[in-house]
Image: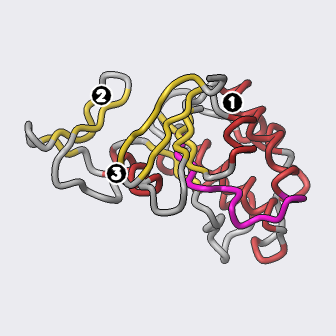
């Protein structure tokens, strides 16, 4: 888990949106694991739908007309051929088995976020982008979700780019921290440091 950390307006969400392909920088280079997603100098721009990024926004953004199971399976439409995460494993990992037949309107904020995380994972992404996924939740709901995020980190081994301005979240989840201030990286390194 690499955490982008900084005050509001420091550029955290801008970076995540550029990685996702939702925002196109005037110039720059974005690469992941040897795959170039954007290189303005070389004229390379991989469209968002070909980047294989799972994105979890601050608010769950679930489809209100689909139940939880259908929302989860929606992520599968974007999964490339080959092995991917199994629905039953993700449901167990996120503790949402009892929610599968419920509509999003009947879920708590924490439940909605867990479903949104599951949907993103089931798309079999190269990278999971999480933009302040706990910011809209009260302390009780944050405490409910943090153990699930730790399990994702430890069991799935899926790279996560995590945006937060919460020291407690970053300290608990991140392995690497990138400190942003006014759109500039001011420090980067292991979270322990």
Residue 108 on the magenta span: no
Tell me: residue 56, above or below residue 105: above
Q: Would you name the residue on which mark 3 appears?
A: 18
Cα–Cα span, label 2 and label 1: 22 Å
Left or right: residue 141 versus residue 28 is right
Secondary structure, mark 1, is helix
Q: Would you name the residue on which mark 1 appears?
A: 153
Is the residue under label 1 in contact with that under label 2 (CB below 8 Å)? Answer: no
Secondary structure, mark 3, is helix
Disc 3 residue crowd, few under 14, some 14–19, many 20+, Cα 10 Å: some
**Which residue does the image show at 83% across and 69% down from the upper left?**
107
The magenta stretch is 128-141
Q: Position of residue 13 (x, y in %)?
A: 46, 56
Quadrant position of residue 37: top left
In this view, the residue in front, 18 or 189, is 189
Tell me: residue 116, above or below residue 173: below
Left or right: residue 49 versus residue 8 is left
Cα–Cα span, label 3 and label 1: 23 Å
Left or right: residue 24 versus residue 113 is left
**Which residue does the image show at 53% across and 50% down from the upper left?**
6
Q: Position of residue 101 (x, y in %)?
A: 83, 64
Quarter of the picture holding the C terminus:
top right
In this view, the residue in front, 99 or 36, is 36
Badge number at residue 35: 2
Callout in the foreground (2, 3): 3
């Amino acid at each position: 888990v690499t955490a982008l950390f900084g005050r509001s307006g420091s550029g955290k969400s801008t970076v995540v949106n550029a990685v996702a392909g939702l925002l196109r920088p005037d110039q720059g280079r974005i690469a992941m694991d040897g795959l170039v997603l954007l290189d303005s100098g070389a004229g390379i721009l991989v469209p968002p739908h070909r980047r294989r990024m799972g994105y979890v926004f601050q608010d769950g953004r679930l489809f209100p007309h689909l139940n939880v199971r259908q929302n989860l399976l929606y992520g599968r439409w974007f999964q490339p051929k080959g092995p991917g995460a199994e629905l039953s494993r993700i449901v167990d990992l996120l503790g949402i088995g009892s929610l599968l037949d419920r509509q999003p309107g009947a879920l708590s904020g924490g439940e909605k976020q867990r479903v949104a995380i599951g949907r993103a994972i089931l798309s079999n992404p190269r990278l999971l982008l999480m933009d302040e996924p706990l910011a809209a939740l009260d302390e009780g709901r944050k405490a409910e979700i943090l153990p699930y995020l730790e399990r994702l980190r430890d069991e799935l081994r899926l790279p996560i780019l995590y945006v937060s301005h919460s020291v407690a979240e970053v300290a608990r989840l991140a392995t690497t921290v990138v400190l942003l201030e006014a759109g500039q990286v001011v420090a980067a390194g292991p979270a322990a440091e």
